[in-house]
Image: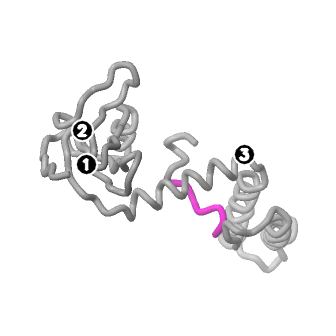
Amino acid sequence: MTHANRSQKDWYSVLEAVPSDGLQELKQKYQRLALLYHPDKQGPDVSEEEAAGRLLRFLEVGQAWKVLSNQDSRREYDLQQRASQLKQHLPVDAHVGLDDMSWDQDKEVYTLGCRCGGEFCIGREELEGEEEEGEEAEEAAAVVCCDTCSLSIEVSRAAPSTLTL
């Protein structure tokens, strides 16, 4: 998914569904909501403002169905949602700056060894992606997990270095 899709709506909530719902359950929920909010199904007593709100809801329901009905887009959406949740709830074990990390020219990533023997790796685009979310360049930071254990670090362009791993 693109950066623009990162902050999009919770499509499961739009369909009044949960991630464990099967395709048939999602389809039934979609059909019920599409009928409920379809512009042709609105009565004559509906105000113009309410009709506009229902039209927007109808379009949202359609978009949610488009994303969740396709196996590939649903898997990609689920992975993106999970990554976003993990990023928000990860405990940070250390704060490091890019100066504390080594640049791996072959892989085009910054790396830092973990105490378990694993590595923390972050590409330039990941840190730049964080900048696009409204942070200043010197304040941009990303949480990175070790590829072997459960430790995580926050990497920033600035050099706060409270490195004690």
Which amino acid does the dot numbered 1 rest on?
Arg
- At horizontal 76% and vertical 77% (from top left) the residue drawn is 46
Q: Looking at this view, is 56 or 105 the one in front?
A: 105
Q: Work out how far the residue at label 3 is from the one at label 2, CA to CA, in angstroms.
A: 34 Å
- Tell me the quadrant of the picture where the N terminus can be found: top right
Report helix, strand or loop for mark 1: loop
* Image x and y of residue 41, in percent: 86, 70
Residue pointed to by mark 3: 72
- Sequence-wise, the earlier of marks 3 and 1 is 3
- Sequence-wise, the earlier of marks 3 and 2 is 3
User: Are dots 3 and 2 in contact, CB under 8 Å?
Assistant: no
Q: Nearer the viewer, mark 3 or mark 2?
A: 3
Q: Which residues are magenta?
A: 7-13
Q: How many marks?
A: 3
The disc label shown at residue 137, or none? 2
Residue pointed to by mark 1: 115
- At horizontal 44% and vertical 59% (from top left) the residue drawn is 86
Which amino acid does the dot numbered 2 rest on?
Ala
Residue 103 image-quadrant placement: top left
Left or right placement of residue 78 versus residue 109 in this view: right
* Image x and y of residue 98, in percent: 21, 36
